[in-house]
Amino acid sequence: MKQADPNKTNAPLESDRSNLFLNGKRFFHRRDYPSALRCFEADLKGLEQSSPLDYRIDLLINLGNIYAQLGMPDRSQEYYQEVLSLQQEKSDPHAIGLTLVNLGNLAREGGDRTRAEAYYLEAADHLKKAKDTHSLAILYSNFGLLAQDRGALDEGITYLKKAIDLHKKTGFEEGLATSWAQLGRLFTKNGNDRDAETCLNYSATHFRSLGDPYGESEALRGLAQIYELRQEPELVLRCRNRIQEIHRRFDLPSPESDPP
């Protein structure tokens, strides 16, 4: 589950963060969540009462994100709720909006679409107030996924196109790569394989330029699924060979034989 990260738009100076925190971020980027968890928990345990509130909030957000990735939504929600309480004391609409997005993500992943939509709508109000185009783009992607969960594929496609337009305006390459992949999968489900192919090719290219082998591999698996449906075995084989190459080069776990 992709969680909103306030550090994307309010990046702290590295000199303001401990080595444990910085190592935790590096492990998180590599998707080594257990190692990241150990770093952030140790940093939080050693935090002094005089430490800046923003630092504590950053740690709690990262811990919430990790527990979400580890499939422990109850623990994740505890951290996010604590973060939300601290942020409301500061009356920071940008930070409050991002935490509401994360709570909405947890609700959506847990199948509670009504609560997810409520969190997302409240988040949108705060992010618009903060004039945070970057985070609104991420939120529109989440609205798109929520529409997909309801079976409203055309609505989901509209939201994702809006997210992509905003990502282009802010130049957020990771957001573009992710949203192109999401849009490609929606087009696949909607029976529009040509547009799906275009989107997933864009996604794979963006992930490759970002140096994200996981993202590129997943986009290629989506392409392989399209080519299988179209009975184009040579293109399927080309995608699978590239996936195997990525996994060998970056020492990733072997990919499943079938695309998602």
Image: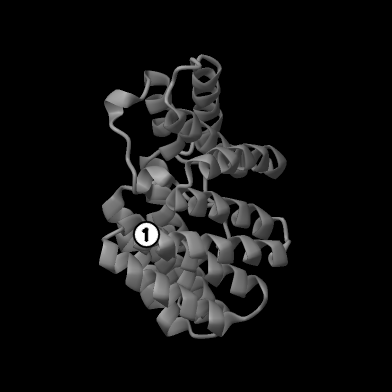
Residue hosting label 1: 132
User: What scheme was used to colour the molecule?
Assistant: one colour
| Quadrant of the image containing the C terminus | bottom right
Quadrant assignment, res 60: top right
Residue 18 versus residue 54 in the image, above or below: above
- The residue at 48%/47% (across/down) is 91
For numbered disc 1, what is the local secondary structure?
Answer: loop
Residue 158 versus residue 121 in the image, above or below: below
**73 to the left or right of 202:** right
x and y percentages locating residue 140 in the rendered image: 48, 68
Q: Of the residues shown, which amino acid type is indicated by label 1?
A: Asp
So how many labels did they put on this image?
1
- The residue at 57%/53% (across/down) is 100
Q: Is residue 250 visible?
A: yes
Depth check: give the residue in front, 109 or 211: 109
Q: Is residue 190 visible?
A: no
- The residue at 54%/44% (across/down) is 88
x and y percentages locating residue 200 in the rendered image: 40, 69
x and y percentages locating residue 29 in the rendered image: 41, 39
Quadrant assignment, res 81: top right
- The residue at 55%/69% (across/down) is 143
Depth check: give the residue in front, 69 or 138: 138
**81 to the left or right of 214:** right
